[in-house]
Image (cartoon, rainbow, N blue to C red):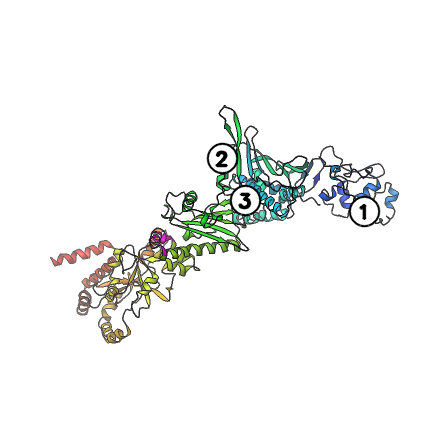
Amino acid sequence: MAQPFGTRVNPPGSLRRHGAPGGGPCQARDIGRRRGCRRGLPLGPPPVSAWVGFRAWGTGIDARPDHPGLAPGTAAAHRRCRVPARPADDARRSAPRPRPRTRRPPPFHPVPAERKVVTTQVETLEFQSEARQLLQLMIHSIYSNKDTFLRELVSNASDALDKVRLEAFRDKDLAADTSDLHVEIEIDAEHRTLTVRDNGIGMTRDDVVQLIGTIAKSGTAEFLRKLRETQDAAASQDLIGQFGVGFYSSFMVADRVELLTRHAGSAHGVRWESSGEGTYTIEPVEDAPQGTSVTLHLKPEDAEDHLSDYTSQWKVREIVKRYSDFITWPIRLAVEKTAEDGEMTRELETVNSMKALWARARDEVTDEEYTEFYKHVSHDWNDPLEVIRMQAEGTFEYQALMFIPAQAPLDLFMRERKRGVQLYVKRVFIMDNCEALMPEYLRFVKGVVDAADLSLNVSREILQQDRHIQLIRKRLIRKVLSTVKSMMTEHPDRYTTFWKEFGSAVKEGLLEDADNRDTILDISSFPSTHDEDAPTTLRQYVERMKDGQQHIYYMTGETRSIIENSPHMEALRAKGFEVLVLTDPIDEMWVGSVPQFDGKEFRSIAKGQVDLDTDEEKETAEAEREQRQKDFAGLLSWMTTTLQENVKEVRLSSRLTTSPACIVGDAYDVTPTLEKMYRASGQNMPQIKRILELNPTHPLVSGLRDAHGERAGDEELTETAELLYGMALLAEGGELGDPARFTSILARRLERTL
């Protein structure tokens, strides 16, 4: 089998060539060329199946005791390597070569088990130059948290235990002990070593070369070239994600790594050792136990390099509880305890809970267990408001256990807020606050998602974007929203608590998530003029709409009091129309992006024209309106010119009943409240001129019309127009452009009344 790791380096004392007088040199490079490999590629050891029946690699000893050995350098020895003998003299070299005679290989006679010989030779192999660079990148650059090395080793051990159980089920004759499958962690503080051991499937020599040697497979040169060309950090992580080499994270914390393994059912094991600098050794072992053990010779503690003391039992416990607490198999830590007689004893203590509640049936888990688990993952003292279970099977499998808290966290609207879903892969903790699985507007949801497999980068800290990630995200969103919808009818008291705590965050989804906008509108509640104490859903609003009503009316503002006392409400209150009272800052944003609900268009009562009359009422009042328009035409034109710095139009209103004037915007103008929000965030907003509407039936307006007709050039009429505009601005909660001038004019007018 061609060695995937790189060039083979003969150990000291071994023969560098087969040779003898007359036979000529037969170095490994020459063998490769004479076998037909004209490029002079490095030659690796033969396949394992060829170790019995062919000459042991790098030695002059035949591996078949029953077959007489041939002297090194003879023609027969070369023929056994499928290499024709090299002529010894120059004359024969210059002569035409005869075509080699085709020979059939000698028959293979199986060697009895008691006669098989296992070589104890230690092979030293060298990484390719590109692989050495990649290994250094693995050690120093990829992982952001050095604690994850233990997660990787325990995860590998858990996989090995899964495999040996499956193989023992498939092959009843497999000589494997599956009575007590477990992972064991042993710490030797004196010699500064940490060993992770399992009694799983183990590895053969080929497995060690191929699996542990993944880092040196072909393509590393191209990978490094792309990595050097990539300047963007995120893109670099995507490139790194093409390699799955978690085992090598051990070199972040260790100067040297030893691996001892024996495949279940095999009689002999393999030892692999490397310092991660350029070479590694591999050798067969006679008495290796079933499974794999990885021993790390730890580096000294270094606070500046964020390198902890991994010989500390509490540190190892902490890492196991954080990353591997829900692993199916017991993880046992060898701990030292003081016996009653004062002697120190070493015992194995299971440090993981193995309680993955999401993997158990619903009827097997009590409410108390769910509550305890919620407090564990959320660090909340309160009980959860709702428990959400989810399981998907088929081509892509995953399980989810999520919780809706009963109280909003303090950082719900802070910039440093974090999302609450944790990601596991095969019960191994991968990341906290997984943004790829839960949208921003559901950031309050706590819990775990455990997938059978996901596209992760090499450090398993960054998700690669693929359709599985998007599929899980979509299903989780739909599940949470459907749970809230069910809560509205089945548990109204819980829904009331939910909306009070998280309604503002959920309404952000009306801007972010167009696919689920209708569902979010269905589960939303808003204050309205129908009931001062109880909010209403949009479905309930539509059911109460008056005959012939085509719009859902709303008004935004800072407080309910300002909205209810606004002049804009007068006509709708008089005709009995219900109005949504929107005081949440996010309401200013979404009402401009959501056009309708259930076929009913949203309409602001502070924007555009509000037409509340029926067709019959319009026909009856049409002549009267036309006459009023003619009567007030002069006043409207004069006021538009007089107030042109503040308003773009002055017109008669159909929405006022008791107030003399109000200010409205065009249908697509930014509201004053939203304008304030933009300015508060540091954005420069251009001045937005709005429309001043006059109530033609109010005595102040009709008196101003008459006065203007009698003395159009009077300066006091200009001041009256300014006062009228200022009062309308203050009535909606606006701010005066020149408060000092307004109060001065008002004071002079009040003085005349005394």
> What segment carries the magenta color?
490-505
Left or right, 53 with reference to 522 = right
Where residue 257 sits in the image (x, y, percent)? 60, 36
Sequence-wise, the earlier of marks 2 and 3 is 2
Q: Secondary structure at mark 1?
A: loop
Residue nearer the viewer, 256 or 359: 359
Comes first in the chain, label 1 or label 3: 1
- Give the residue furthest to the top: 341
- Residue 172 position, x and y percent, is 64, 46
Disc 1 packing (10 Å; few <14; some 14–19; many ≥20): few
Q: Is residue 86 above or below residue 675?
A: above
Labels 1 and 2: the sequence-earlier one: 1
Q: Quadrant of the N terminus?
A: top right
> According to the image, label 2 marks what residue?
315
Residue tagged by mark 1? 105
Cα distance between the residues tagged 1 and 3: 49 Å
In this rendering, position of residue 536 left or right of residue 186? left
